[in-house]
Amino acid sequence: VEHPEPRVRSLVAQVVGAYALYATSLLNWMSSHGLPSHSRSQSEESQTNETQQLPHELKTSIIHSQKGRRQIHRVILASLRSHLAMKEPSRENNPSAASDGALDDTTGWRALETNLHALASYIDGCVGNGFVGENDEEKREDGAISSGSYLLEEAHLFESHDGDGDGEWFLPGLQHCSVVHVNRHVRAASAAVLGVLIKSCMRSRRYSSRETRDYLEDLLVESDSLFRRVLKESLKGTLADNWSQVRMAGSVLCRRYVGALMRIYRGRKKAAMRDGEKVDEEEEEEEEDVTVFESAAGDLVPMLLPRMCLNRFYIAQGVKLYSQDTWKTVFEQQKQSREGEEDTTATAVGGGGMGAVARNAAPLCRYYAKMCDADNHAVREAACQGVAELAQKLGKHSLYAEFLAPHVTILLQALLMCFHDESWPVRDEACLACGTFCLAYAEECLPELPTLFERWTEQMTDQIWSVREDAAVALGDAIAAYGPDMLEKVMKVLKQSLPAAKDQPAMSREEYKKLQNDMQAHTGNQLYSCGSLAPKLRKGGAGRIGCGNCAIDRPKAPWEATDGCIYLMRELCVRFANRDHSEREDVVLDDNTLLPLMTELADSCRLSHYPQSDDLRTTLWRQLPPIAGALGKRRFKSLYLDLFIELLAKNLDDRCGTGASQLSIHAAGQCAEELANLIGVGIFRGRLEAVGREDAFDRVMEERRRE
């Protein structure tokens, strides 16, 4: 395990696990052929001993294999302890922030990682359920018997001692490696060791006596257990680690630990019912008001639940999907017992996941607010998504809305802080979340409404199109929440910004392309690796951890304000232009209001004196079909279709030499097809004939039929 070649060390770890599995499997076989077993009664053991006897040589050989297995374990522990005693940089004082110290953070730390992998393989390979006698020759040096179960053989490692015993360094050392150690591979490997320890504990309890089973379960359940305290701190650190690799290892550990706690809780509850123990009615009612997860995890819930929630939105797909699956596993409506029967203690009791979140809203909101100010931009983005989910699901729930209401102010403040983030996905999610909060908690958000409105209108002109779109969605939410007063403010902004494209400076496509390919403008800038932890995306001007930052910020362009207004027009038409389907009865946009705005929009999109005008028209063609659908066939055909038909036909025909991009041509074709299906293909083609562009439409429709 200390070989200089890392591939050799990795193979050694696998061999260690294979040998442990071989030796303990022999032990199980031996136990079933003549030696006592934890899982058999004394009468069965006596009968077996009388009828079956193993040859002395075979028995001796198996016992020697156990001694060899334990000797390997002692070597691993000795190497692990010596590596833990080495001085390594802490995460707070990490030289990897400079280029000359990067190896300390991105490569294996000596043989410590390999020792942890070897230990995990060894523990996972110890599948024994019996023991090899009790005479002095067969005992370990410390007096323990060879049971083949790691937690029973090495019980001294899980006990606190006042002296210098193994219990004083083993579990604290694993906690140090998973939380404090500078190397991410070591942190992930340590979390894996803790996971296989839980697996070994749950495996051993199946073959143990009642007393031994209670001892093993108490290691995981009792609050004063050293093992439980180490698991708590390790989960707290790994589930919030900046490295996705460590966060994934923490998520695996979390699922395994929570699953173990829930199985123990159900098992003890069923055992109590079998033993005829009386259950206090008040206590039983309290248990029905919470989920099995809350009852089983106890004081771990305020720490675990917020991290489990946030990781469902984490940017790394592995962490996100695994955490979502864990959530479904823990809070699903139906639980299947080990025998395949439906479990009557299903976690739907207590409201499932939504009920658990509502009852723990205080620690969850504090954690989300803290993560909105995290160094990692991916964590800030996930926190904003989590806050939006709270507003969407709890805020609109008749039973649970009141649980979140006291925390709306702190969440809004956290979101307002994210509006200035240099990471556009963070700004995007914060913008949407604020709009959702206004819908769910209109009164509570009213004091912050002026600030929110200012931020939304700023986002309407952002350099990123999706941020502009979501700002329009948020303004639509605000209108739905506050009615005509908010509509008046929005209409004022819309009328002011809609013609902004007319102020875009003239530029030819050749000049634009020359500017993009100017080597001088792109020379000498700092380059960043995707895997680096150098400060990148910043929030509020402070250095933050991220991936993909550039210190140069492009100024906003006037045409982008018009582009944002197209999304806002879509929101107004879809949500408030139809009297029968308006989200508010007192907010209905008639044609006297919409027609001048649509006319101004068509005029702005006809401009072509700047190269980005093609992008503006692409947005128009993508948003025009939902606008037309909301207005209705008759209304759109009679008043609005003629405003756009000539421009659409011109964009369809790329043979005219307009220099339109393939994106805008494709968007125009898609728009033409959807509008034709809405008002009728014959009617739409007739309108095109009036401007002499029916051939382009026929060609586009034929291409789409072939596709």
Image (spheres, rainbow, N blue to C red):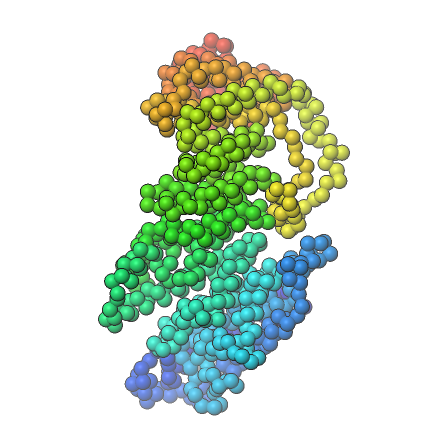
The correct choice, above or below, for 374 with respect to 513 in the image is below
Q: Position of residue 448 (x, y in %)?
A: 49, 36
The correct choice, above or below, for 328 with respect to 635 in the image is below
Quarter residue 203 falls in: bottom left
Q: Position of residue 284 (x, y in %)?
A: 27, 61
Residue 436 can be seen in this image: no
Which residue: 49% across, 65% down? 231
Which residue: 49% across, 81% down? 66
Q: From the viewer's side, name the closer residue of 114 and 312.
A: 312
Which residue: 40% across, 79% down? 130
Q: Position of residue 672 (x, y in %)?
A: 46, 21
Which residue: 53% across, 27% down? 564
Q: From the viewer's side, name the closer residue of 140 and 440.
A: 440
- Total label count? 0
* Quadrant of the snapshot with the N terminus: bottom right
Q: From the viewer's side, name the closer residue of 161 and 648.
A: 161
Residue at the top extreme? 690
